[in-house]
Amino acid sequence: MKRKRVLVTGGAGFIGSHLCERLLGMGHDVLCVDSYFTGSRDNISHLFDNYRFEVIRHDITKELFVEVDEIYNLACPASPVHYQYNPIKTIKTSVMGSIHVLGLAKRVKAKVLQASTSEVYGDPHSSPQHESYWGNVNPIGIRSCYDEGKRCAETLFMDYHRQNQVRIKIARIFNTYGPRMQPDDGRVASNFIMQALRDEDLTIYGDGTQTRSFQYIDDLLDGLSALMDTGDEIIGPVNLGNKNEFTINELAQMVLELTGSGSRITYLPLPENDPVQRKPDTAYARELLDWEAAIPLREGLQKTISYFETLLRG
Ligand code: NAD
Ligand code: UDP
């Protein structure tokens, strides 16, 4: 295997920190760039002793000049609570961040992978969502800073590829969970687990019949590196997600069962434009990458619950 210099933007976040660890384990040099908006030094502190690991505190809405062979562009808040906190900054991160990352890839001839999202499908009219589906996204809603930012990022990736022959990969990531999500992250898996472990009410938004397909972090890492390793003719977009779909009610029941918690359930209003259904069509990823998310929700939740239990014990 050729040792590569790999840049991970958003490397101190949930997915990014696992990816940095994985890439170091594969023998690569890793440069983690993060503004620490939603990520934290705690997520990567166990990597600081590794001389092949470097960290730069940097905001990707500003230009970056480094020498690397590959780039994973993960920088962007992913929880609705966090990306709606400063929506203008969120869209700047996706749009200006992508322009800077793509400019860098063009200069140094690096291969660059964009962490896109199932949110580009919006509130989908077809299920499961196939890569050919153009989506149903509200351009002026409270989720638009994220959804439209990510859609514009995909456009930028495609145009840098067509116009400047930049070697790109686009991964459309579906809901991913696991250790190192922030306890106050606001996303459903971490919320339910923290609430259950603290014997607080589980907060279900709406009637809980909306669905999501939850992928454990290890499956996603396998998918991301398989996609990065494909030949230059493969650009995607490729759905990376678990094809098993659950209602939010089912998720809540599973978390209660696995934690043995006495928590009850409170129903709160559904946030605006919250998608009703989300399930990836994974045929393309299977055919292209020989990859499929394999870790069942129950097993992934158990590992995530253990992580949060340890965190709470301090
Ligand atoms: P996260 O919030 O834990 O990580 C995002 C990281 O990006 C954080 O460390 C944050 O500090 C950093 N960041 C944010 N804005 C930045 C900026 N302007 N400059 C530099 N760093 C910045 O979220 P995550 O779940 O790890 O998501 C990582 C990526 O994967 C995001 O791009 C997200 O959109 C994408 N994604 C995640 C999921 C999921 O379910 N986790 C699903 C689809 C797509
Ligand atoms: N959700 C919920 N309770 C929570 C957090 C989220 O019922 O405490 C719901 C949310 O309304 C959505 C689903 O769970 O329907 C997934 O939300 P999340 O924020 O994890 O990600 P999304 O897929 O909406 O980006």
Image: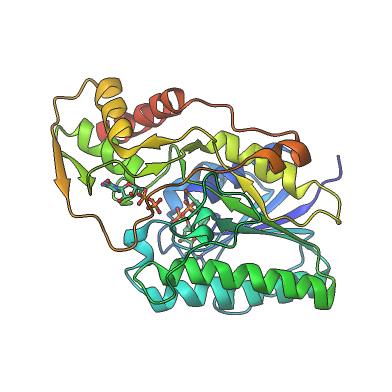
Query: Whole-percent x and y of residue 239?
Result: 62, 48
Q: Is residue 268 above or below residue 201?
A: below
Q: How many marks on residues?
A: 0
In this image, 99 relative to 175: left or right?
A: right
State the residue at coordinates (16%, 45%).
Answer: 267
Residue 61 seen in the figure: yes
Q: Residue at x 51, y 72 (%)?
A: 93
Q: In which quadrant will I find the N terminus?
A: top right
Q: Quadrant of residue 101?
A: bottom right
Please, is residue 137 above or below residue 54 in the view?
A: below
Q: x, y percentage for residue 24?
A: 67, 42
Which sits in the foreground, 3 or 190?
Answer: 190
The residue depicted at 27 percent of the width and 33 percent of the height is 252
Query: For residue 283, what is the image quadrant?
Result: top right
Determine which quarter of the picture holds residue 161.
Answer: bottom right
Residue 149, given in percent of the width and then of the height, sits at 51, 71
Q: Residue furthest front?
A: 125
From the viewer's perspective, tell me whether residue 223 is left or right of residue 69: left
Q: Quadrant of the C terminus?
A: top left
Foreground of the two, 204 or 281: 281
Tell me if residue 172 comes above or below residue 290 in the rendering.
below
